[in-house]
Amino acid sequence: MSRTGLLAVFPKVFAGKHVGHPAVQLRRVRTVELAASNIVAYADGERIGALPMTIEVVPHAVCVLA
């Protein structure tokens, strides 16, 4: 996706309306590998480190009480 295309779609992310865009793909996975040059990864607004990195979902790792 071009930078211009990303700028057009990005505001829709907050409302969840980006999922219908042809460049967006949703997948359920346990592990994902991210790679790019000169990019720092963030998760939930927190810096987690430079790419490349492998991220793994750990089932039942967090208990949330609401």
Image (tube, grey):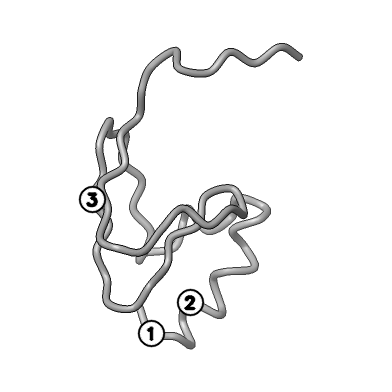
User: Is the residue under label 2 in contact with that under label 1 (CB below 8 Å)?
Assistant: yes
34 over 1 or under it: above or below: above
Identified by mark 1, the residue type is Ser
Q: Quadrant of residue 66?
A: top right
Report, in whole angstroms, how far the alpha carbon at label 1 lies from the one at label 2.
Answer: 6 Å
The residue indicated by pointer 2 is 6
Report, in whole angstroms, how far the alpha carbon at label 2 lies from the one at label 3.
Answer: 21 Å
Q: Is residue 66 left or right of residue 8?
A: right
Q: Is residue 42 left or right of residue 28?
A: right
Q: Quadrant of the N terminus?
A: bottom left
Report, in whole angstroms, how far the alpha carbon at label 1 lies from the one at label 3.
Answer: 21 Å
Q: Is residue 39 left or right of residue 37?
A: right
Q: Nearer the viewer, residue 63 or 23?
A: 63
User: Is the residue under label 3 in contact with that under label 2 (CB below 8 Å)?
Assistant: no
| Circle 1 residues within 10 Å: few <14, some 14–19, many ≥20 | few
Q: Nearer the viewer, residue 22 or 33?
A: 33
The residue under the point 48% across, 77% down is: 6
| Circle 2 residues within 10 Å: few <14, some 14–19, many ≥20 | few
**Element type at mark 2:** helix
**Element type at mark 1:** loop
11 over 33 or under it: above or below: below
Q: Which mark is residue 2?
A: 1
Instruction: Name the outermost residue toward the front.
Output: 49
Q: Which mark is residue 26?
A: none
The residue under the point 50% across, 57% down is: 42
Identified by mark 2, the residue type is Leu
Residue 13 is situated, as x and y percent measured from the top left of the image, at 59, 58
Q: Nearer the viewer, residue 19 or 60?
A: 60
The residue under the point 43% across, 60% down is: 41
Residue 49 is situated, as x and y percent measured from the top left of the image, at 41, 58
49 over 63 or under it: above or below: below
**Element type at mark 3:** strand
